Image: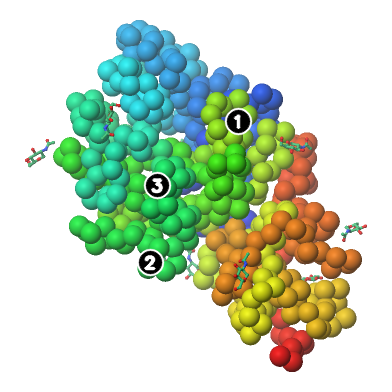
Amino acid sequence: MSRVSWEECILLLMALLANASGTFIGINIGTEISNLPSASNIISILKIHEIKHVRLLDADHQMLTALANTGVEVMVSVPNDQLLKVGESRSEAADWINKNIAPYLPATNITYIAVGNEVLTTIPNAALVLVPAMQFLQSALLAANLNTQVKVSSPQSMDIIPKSFPPSTSTFNSTWNSVMYQFLQFLKNTGSSFMLNAQPYYGYTKGNGIFPIEYALFRSSTPNSQIVDPNTLFYYTNMFDAMVDAAYYSMQALNFSGIPVLVTASGWPSRGGANEPDATIDNALVYNSNLVNHVLNGSGTPSQPSIPINTYLYELFNEDLLPGPISEKNWGMYNPNGTAVYTLNFGSVNETTDTVTVPLGEVGVFCVANSSADSTALKEGLDWACGSGSANCSAIQPGQPCYESDNLVATASYAFNDYYHMTQANGGTCNFGDTAMITSVDPSHGSCIFAGSSGSNGTTNRGSVASGPMVPVNDGSRLRFLDWSHAHTVPLVLFFWFAL
Ligand SMILES: *[C@@H]1O[C@H](CO)[C@@H](O)[C@H](O)[C@H]1NC(C)=O
Ligand SMILES: *[C@@H]1O[C@H](CO)[C@@H](O)[C@H](O)[C@H]1NC(C)=O
Ligand SMILES: *[C@@H]1O[C@H](CO)[C@@H](O)[C@H](O)[C@H]1NC(C)=O
Ligand SMILES: *[C@@H]1O[C@H](CO)[C@@H](O)[C@H](O)[C@H]1NC(C)=O
Ligand SMILES: *[C@@H]1O[C@H](CO)[C@@H](O)[C@H](O)[C@H]1NC(C)=O
Ligand SMILES: *[C@@H]1O[C@H](CO)[C@@H](O)[C@H](O)[C@H]1NC(C)=O
Ligand SMILES: *[C@@H]1O[C@H](CO)[C@@H](O)[C@H](O)[C@H]1NC(C)=O
Ligand SMILES: *[C@@H]1O[C@H](CO)[C@@H](O)[C@H](O)[C@H]1NC(C)=O
Ligand SMILES: *[C@@H]1O[C@H](CO)[C@@H](O)[C@H](O)[C@H]1NC(C)=O
């Protein structure tokens, strides 16, 4: 394992992103925000993360202008409240294209129009207008000779599939059969994609304990938290794949095949009300990191292994003006003031090379040894963390700030926490043979500073830089919030030896 510079990491990431043969991760940019950042600040955030695909939930002209010549591919939306108008007549649809699409091409690379959002399940009265609106827009694109540049589709909610498990028996709610038939025919004829908002957060919370949270968070490491489809015998290691496959099988049930699923929204809220205990920063970071890795792996779903699942993360900003429970306002990776809620790595890490550990982990969350745990098990966990786990255990060596020769719990806590903060973004857990637990109580004392402590300093105590304020957004030096400079070396000798 060698030390890798920041520049090398970026090159490696770019190579990986390019390798993944067209598979991409994009992001939703919602604007129901009381104090919306400027379009140029938003572009700066996209640049730092090398995000090349965005979904706008409207057709904001300032954003479309700012996205010109950035290399970013843009999906624009017809908001639900404009659907009736656009579906009314060909001329209204042509007008919409002339105002919102045509003037921005080709400088702004608009490639998709999402017509409404979850129309059938949220505004069922408009259902009969949906396909006509799509057809009118398509005709207007054709007339403007833009039909090969811009595709038309409409994002659907998972609620349109009443019973999504097992995926192989899923069907769309038959109430909408005739609309769905026309919808799929349109997608097939125009070479468009089936847009799906796939949200395991809802699948998990509405499941009331049927599904283990590990399954929702892409963390199913043991067969008993994976789920088998009894008809196909496919193993589902995560709910996201099962949702996407449910959409494929539902299309098949209407005799449609060859329409790729494009996931237009998937994410996890970082904060919720008292009755929303699973909306946490920890879960949001784990879900989104694992989703990015899963998508960029390019391996498709069990039923469609050769079709990559391009996905738009939901979402860039917390949207404080959205109605509903607290969690609804907290799906974003950034606060509107530009501070990070948590820091996500948008690139896939080549795990086999083991040179790039992405040192992320949020401030204020610690993984510590359970003081009631069996001491032999604790010692095994400690040895593992400092050995195979590659935690940086130098601070607990003799003479170093966190050295406490007779305190196994404190020593193990340091190592567990270091491992956790180093690997959390890639799905690392706080477990260590059931001897560890998460706490928000900062175990740092004196000059012994734990990773994730707000009193810690950037490079050695990973996490603090990560969540630092990002304003002003155009100051490049402060934007480099991924701590790329840190690379791990396994301690050659572990000096401590507990007499147990
Ligand atoms: C726009 O995106 C499409 C699809 O990826 C790509 O083929 C095309 O080269 C892009 N156009 C520009 C001008 O960047
Ligand atoms: C199908 O949709 C209709 C209309 O929204 C709804 O009344 C019905 O309950 C749904 N069926 C199922 C099985 O969810
Ligand atoms: C799908 O095709 C099969 C075989 O051609 C046919 O029996 C079935 O009725 C079709 N289903 C629908 C919903 O069109
Ligand atoms: C993708 O994931 C599969 C299944 O986890 C794994 O076998 C494969 O090595 C991964 N491929 C890449 C390129 O990471
Ligand atoms: C940014 O917004 C967040 C959430 O509203 C708040 O907690 C934080 O203090 C703000 N930071 C700055 C620098 O304004
Ligand atoms: C990961 O690294 C290994 C070893 O260097 C290499 O063979 C493999 O192609 C890499 N995978 C990807 C997806 O780059
Ligand atoms: C700590 O360990 C004890 C004994 O194994 C166990 O009963 C307890 O639930 C653990 N506490 C936590 C927070 O995991
Ligand atoms: C390990 O942590 C120490 C401080 O505890 C720091 O000085 C050192 O640079 C770290 N080593 C690596 C490889 O990050
Ligand atoms: C952080 O760094 C500053 C400047 O290098 C130093 O003065 C301060 O003591 C450090 N704080 C901690 C907690 O290490």
- Amino acid at the residue labelled 1: Glu
The earlier-in-sequence mark between 3 and 1 is 3
Give the residue at x 29% y 61%.
Answer: 228
Say if 369 sits above or below 494 in the image: above
Residue 318's image quarter? top right
- Amino acid at the residue labelled 2: Asn
Q: Which circle, 3 or 1, is nearer the viewer?
A: 3
Q: Which residue is mark 2?
A: 224
**Quadrant showing the C terminus:** bottom right
Say if 401 sits above or below 130 in the image: below
Q: Secondary structure at mark 2?
A: helix
**Quadrant showing the N terminus:** bottom right
Q: Is residue 467 left or right of residue 104?
A: right
Marks 1,2: beta carbons within 8 A: no
Q: How many numbered marks does the figure carry?
A: 3
Give the residue at x 82% y 79%.
Answer: 404
Marks 3,1: beta carbons within 8 A: no
Q: Which residue is mark 3?
A: 207
Give the residue at x 21% y 32%.
Answer: 174
Q: Which circle, 1 or 2, is nearer the viewer?
A: 2
Percent across and percent down for residue 291 are 48, 52
Q: Nearer the viewer, residue 79 or 49?
A: 79
Q: Which residue is mark 1?
A: 319
Percent across and percent down for residue 32 are 59, 25
